[in-house]
Image (cartoon, rainbow, N blue to C red):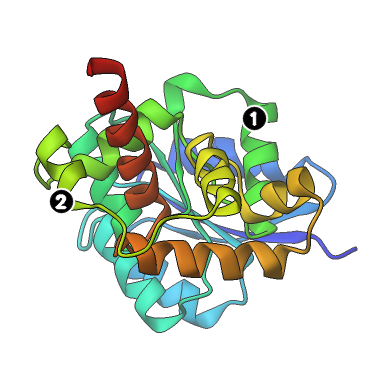
Amino acid sequence: MNDVKVLLADDNIVIRQGLRSLLDGEDGIHVIAEASTGAEAIQYAKRYSTDVILMDIRMPVIDGIDATAEIIRINPDAKILILTVTEDLKILARAIRAGAMGYLLYSHFSPDELIRAVHTVASGQYITPSPVVAFALATFPEKEVTSSFVKEQIPLEPLTPREMEILELIADGRSNAEIAQVLVVEEKTIKNHITRMYSKLNINSRYEAIRFKLGSLSIIISS
């Protein structure tokens, strides 16, 4: 099995060295390049074949969010994980919308958790925050989810029982592969269900699905 090739992007050389030491010391992971600015991250993402890019947000020249958006524009299959000290949900929401597959906060993860996250993202799965945090991310910078918003989102067609199951599992932070495993079906089948569900709800992303699910739940609880 080939090593997971990682690109590090952080303007702090001490952090980069620490990450390189940690990741290169792990079997199955290899750091192939380091970028100190968002502009370098874009350049290296084009130059090297990477499996995962670990991206800081606050960097000179081009910040990590704009760099993420540009890398995804060039290569929609790029897998980018945000590593940051900020807990500002507005900033994190921008990073997710730019195309990041999730984020980890430096003060909240252990070395083992980072290694697992690298492998998770390399396999194409998202590092999904808790449903409550996902809900908050989905509402920035858009209006808050309210009863009136959810009522406006009545499906064009009723969701099937299977689609409701999948919506519940998405809200729990499960990936497509995990949902397929739980429901004992092919992952392609799950993708087809999600495509139809998105069309019925007039949405385009997992965060909007979580937003709808949690908004619907708040109506049930308050009614």
Residue 61 in sight in this render: yes
Say which quadrant the C terminus sits in. top left
- Amino acid at circle 2: Glu
As rendered, which of 47 and 213 lies closer to the eye?
213
Report the residue marked by disc 1.
113
As rendered, which of 48 and 2 lies closer to the eye?
2
Q: Mark 2 or mark 1, which is nearer to you?
A: 2
Name the residue located 52 percent from the left edge and 62 percent from the top edge: 194
How crowded pointer 2 is (Cα within 10 Å; few <14, some 14-19, many 20+) is rated as few
Quarter occupied by residue 68: bottom left
Element carrying mark 1: helix
Residue 65 at x, y percent in the picture: 28, 56
- Amino acid at circle 1: Glu
Residue 146 at x, y percent in the picture: 14, 34
Residue 216 against residue 93 in the figure, above or below: above
So how many labels did they put on this image? Answer: 2
Mark found first going from the N terminus, 2 or 1: 1
Mark 2–mark 1 Cα distance, whole angstroms, equals: 39 Å
Q: Residue furthest right?
A: 1
Quick check: marks 2 and 1 in contact, CB under 8 Å?
Answer: no
Report the residue marked by disc 2.
152
Name the residue located 18 percent from the left edge and 44 percent from the top edge: 151
